[in-house]
Amino acid sequence: MPPIMRRLAVIFVAGFICICGGLRTFACTTFVLQGGDRIYLGRNLDWGWEDGLVLVNARHVRKIAFVAPDHVPAKWTSKYESVTFNQFGRELPFGGMNEAGLVVENMWLDGTQYPPADARPEINMLQWIQYQLDNYSTVAEVVGSDQQIRLENTAVRARIHYLVCDAQGDCATIEFLNGAMRVHRGGDLPYRALANDTYERATAYLRAHPPRKGAAQPFFRTGSLARFCRAAARANEFKPAKIPAQDLDYAFDTLSQVRQGKFTVWQIVYDISTRQIHFRTRSNPQKRQVDFKTLDFACTRPTQYVDIQANASSSGVLEFHELSEAEHQKYVEHFFAQKSLKRTVGDMTSMVKPLLLTLRGYTCADQ
């Protein structure tokens, strides 16, 4: 990395650490529904802010990871196109799906311990998601990437784990405990859900407190273990309907059953089988749809985006626009200028320029 880029990277990473370090015990829930050839992954974002960008990420883009200047950054060229949901700006998604049907989502997990330093190049916890979507089509490849890259072990207090699923129906929870990747997959993944406890602890609790039959029973508890139990029960009881729209209704109803009141700001359902994404937000409950078939992922084009609060057409389809540097700057400046964010972590607007300059180093391999 050139010296100027390394200086910019450390400024960016330091700011990101401050943001995440100020946020504690936020909750989220994910689950997978599968029946026949239909696979859906549902996700609630329970968080203090609901701003966001829905981004179209091109293939054939040369990239470098955002890590501290004394660390060795991962480098790669994106192989797959993807759509991601980003709050802190480009390249730092909370989750998304790529053209091959791979979905990666994250949730908070206190107790996460990232690996100690070794010879592998590094990447931060959110760009790890983009790296997987850029490079791989299967869960097996995601798990195998631990041999190639290492999650950056910094002073950041934010700690997360991941739920990953692919178009073949292979799913896994991925956690970093005691400095090593811990994977639950296949026969070791009896319940396809994840909240804010380790998968092992959540499944032990579910076995000790089996839910009563009937997914429609009232749900009053909203703690992590209770949400995991409800999501797991709904996933296990899922039977595909004659009409796919009814499957989506079931998925959104499940998300509503494990919501955290006003703190649930995004609700997303990935229809892996059709490469469509459906979502709604707290401020805009209209269901909106992203269809991969309608998007242009060419890396020679400017990045495409839509604001997560944007209205869709009468058919629920969103219209994407060019994300110029000016538009990106406007978004991140607005996000970091929010009074609630400043009260929590201070004024982070100084991150904007270094972020924009760093992203200028991303180039199209087709040119």
Image: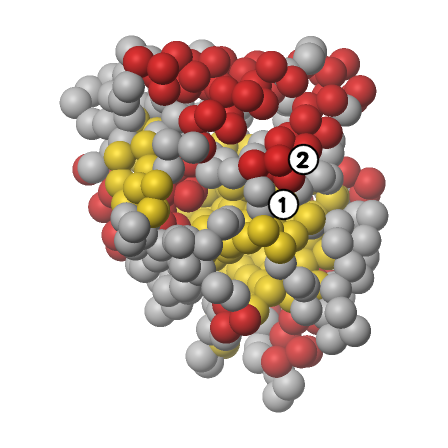
When the figure is inspected, residue 347 is found, relative to residue 51, above or below; the finding is above
The residue located at (49%, 50%) in the rendering is 302
Q: Quadrant of residue 22?
A: top right
Give the distance between the C-alpha atoms of the residues marked 2 and 1, in whole angstroms. 9 Å
- Label 2: which residue? 331
The residue located at (76%, 14%) in the rendering is 343
The answer to whether residue 256 of the structure is visible from this angle is no
Q: Toward the viewer: 251 or 60? A: 60
Count the marks: 2
The residue located at (83%, 48%) in the rendering is 283
- Label 1: which residue? 53
Q: Is residue 355 left or right of residue 174?
A: right
Task: Tell me which numbered mark, 2 or 1, is placed earlier along the sequence.
Answer: 1
When the figure is inspected, residue 259 is found, relative to residue 212, above or below; the finding is above
The residue located at (50%, 20%) in the rendering is 354
Q: Residue furthest front?
A: 367
At which x and y percent is residue 29?
A: 61, 46
Disc assigned to residue 7: none
